[in-house]
Image (cartoon, rainbow, N blue to C red):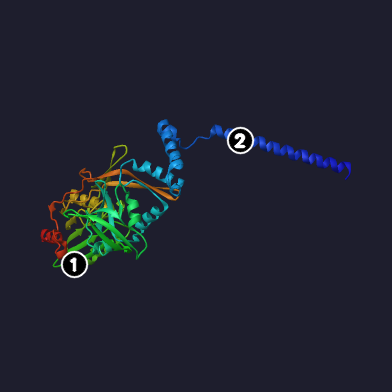
Amino acid sequence: MDIKSKKRILIEFIVAIFILSLNFVLAYKLGKESKVYYKPFFDFKQEFGEEYNKLFSEVWKKIKENFVDKKKINPQKAAFEAIRGLVRSLDDPYSDLYTPMQSKIFEEDLKGSFCGIGIEIGIRNNLLTVISPLEGTPAARAKIKAGDVISKINGEDTTNISLEEAVSKIRGECGTKVKLTIIREGWKEEKDFELTREEIKIKAVESKFIEPDIGYIKINTFNQNTIPEFVEKFNKLSKEGANKYILDLRNNPGGYLDIAIQMSEFFIPRGKIILKETGKDGKEKVIRSEGPGTLKDIKVVVLVNKGSASASEIFAGALRDNLGIKLIGEKTFGKGSVQQVFKINSYLLKLTIAYWLTPKGAKLEGNGLEPDIKVVDKNPEDNIDEVLNKGIEILK
């Protein structure tokens, strides 16, 4: 190798060392500067104080050092439950953090088809309570009723259980079994119900013609199928000669608020109040009908019970407050809150963001709607529907 070649190699080596050194210096400088500009999104100590920061660290340390079963120490599960604790500290039964599996259940609900036993559940007085059994499902066939308290699921106590956790335990693969332990008013002791899960398809609207001129329309839920099915059933009954209508909202657990509003607009003229809403700022938002109100003059009664909740209470309250339509049956469930869902990675955070009021300002949450004509079906197993019969009597 000649002297010229050696010089060229030496120069290239020095340049390479210089570039590497420069990159190192720049990287170090940028790293230091990033520390200046970086701000943590969340600082536990700053948010909750030194006492709880230290408590959290010490508790986790003691668990890792002393808990008897090391296999049960799961950092990911611990972190999730700690985060979920933030939501549960709100003491609101309708706010929760969903795991990816629970998020899937939530999305199944929106589709209206899932494997389960066919009950809508809620939290009432800190107890897991049946809002309503869905007709034609395992729960309805087993005679589970609105108002039943579920004390255990597969032998596990339901005290302090969240709605979503309860749903995830009750649902499962079609053909498998689940055991519910039920407490019912009037019973001396609780009873076990073993039910086989099956595919649950929610039929939004059902109807029948009652001689000589009454149309009966049962609205089971307010989902994307409710309006087209209602229009179809109403037109069919009208052609058969119906000019008076019974709207049955019994065991209707609710659904989409916007669907309930659109249903109300068939009856309530443009400009009239359908509902009021109060948010975190305490201000009242008024939602008015955009019409057409073409059914405002039709004679109607509405059937309700303690399984009528949420959007069905909004619909019933709007018809009564605006048109004087009579509610017949039992006091409704009393769920009048608005939830918003936030997608965070593969998790869903559901938070109550507002409360609903009837057009005349009655708060639904925890109160429900008192019927104008109270009728309790004392013995539903005798196949005599006393509430429906009262509705027919009023229309006649």
Q: Left or right: 23 with respect to 386? A: right
User: What residue is shown with label 2?
Assistant: 30
Residue at horizontal 30%, vertical 44%? 92
Image depth: mark 2 or mark 1 in front: 2
Q: Left or right: 341 with respect to 182? A: right
The quarter in which the N terminus is drawn is: top right
State the mark number for residue 151: none
Q: Position of residue 79 (x, y in %)?
A: 43, 44
Question: Which amino acid lies under the numbered mark 2 shown in the image of this protein?
Answer: Leu
Q: Which residue is farthest right?
A: 2
Crowding around mark 1 (Cα neighbors within 10 Å: few <14, some 14 to 19, many 20+) is some
Q: Position of residue 230 (x, y in %)?
A: 26, 61
State the mark number for residue 209: 1
Crowding around mark 2 (Cα neighbors within 10 Å: few <14, some 14 to 19, many 20+) is few
Q: Quadrant of residue 135?
A: bottom left
Who is closer to the viewer here, 91 or 252? 91
Question: Which amino acid lies under the numbered mark 1 shown in the image of this protein?
Answer: Phe
